[in-house]
Structure formats: structure tokens, C-alpha cells
Image (cartoon, helix red, strand yellow):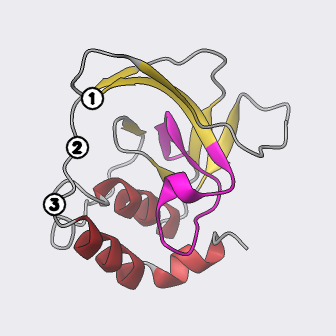
Amino acid sequence: IGMIGSCGCKDLSSDGIWWNSKHQLGKVYFNLSNDNVYLLDCYKNIIENSLSYDEACCLDGFIMITQYDVFWREDIFDAWHFYDASQSMEFINKGYKIVIPKQYEPWYIHLGESSSSNYEDYRLKFLNTYSSTIKMFESI
């Protein structure tokens, strides 16, 4: 195991957006800016197993715990969007597993706002940079 996260997916949709996956993983409470806390329960279409974690192909970036040093692709992903998906692909390309521990209750509260600035540009960069890795995990 090379990296642990709290939310992500087992496969990727063809658009490269992890939350559009048919097989999402994890739970988190989040608060964007209006002081309301929401539960994001990402467990969708997951087959139960006896392990204490599920393997993932892509993590959300609000928490990424690593055991190995793998360079971040700051030459391509130098802003808010897709840095987390990029780092997930880098770990997979190095042969490391990415996992999300099973959570019956969320372990984290994610506080913060997101920006939609340049989202589509970074999404296309992600798809172009990691097309061969993404194909291994693409949803059908």
C-alpha cells in the first residue's frame, strides 16, 4: 500500500471525474462556507469483502497519506484541480496500491471552498497525460 485516502473511486468514468464513477468509496463531512455540515457518503455499488479497506484508483485530495515519496506533477498540475487524481495515477504507475479504509462513520470534516477556475483545462490535461493508466480503470 502506497497511499491512503478517505474518498475516491475504484474505477473512473471516461470524463476522468472520480465522483462520476459507478463505484465510489469513502465518507466525509464537509462544510463549504455556509456553516452547514453535510455528509458525503460515497459508498456506491461496492461488493463487500473481509478486508479493512477497499482498493481505489483515484483519491480525493482533501487527505492523501503516503508511505513513499513520489514526485508531484507540478509541471502540469500547478493549481487546485486534478492534482489529486494526478498523484493517484503516479502512485499506480509506480506499482503502489491506493486504498480507502472502510468507514462506518466519517473520520474527517472537510472545511473549505473550491474554485471552478480552469477546471475544464485541467480535466483535459489529466485525460491527455494519463490516458493509458485511466483505460485500466475505466467504467464500462
In the rendered structure, which disc, 2 or 1, sits on the residue that comes first in sequence?
Answer: 1
Q: Look at the numbered discs 2 and 1 and tell me whether their residues touch, using CB distance below 8 Å.
A: yes
Residue receiving disc 2: 114
Quadrant location of the N terminus in the rendered image? top right
Work out how far the residue at label 3 is from the one at label 1, CA to CA, in angstroms: 16 Å
Location of residue 74 by image quarter: bottom left
Task: Measure the C-alpha gap from mark 2 to mark 3.
Answer: 9 Å
* Quadrant position of the C terminus in the picture: bottom right
The residue where tag 3 is placed is 117
Where is residue 60 drawn, in percent x and y? 42, 45
Marker count (numbered): 3
Q: Residue at x 69, y 41 (%)?
A: 54
**Mark 2: which amino acid?**
Ser
125 sits left or right of 76 in the view: right
> Which kind of residue does numbered mark 3 sit on?
Ser
What amino acid is at disc 1?
Answer: Leu
Element on which disc 1 rests = loop
Q: Which mark is residue 32?
A: 1
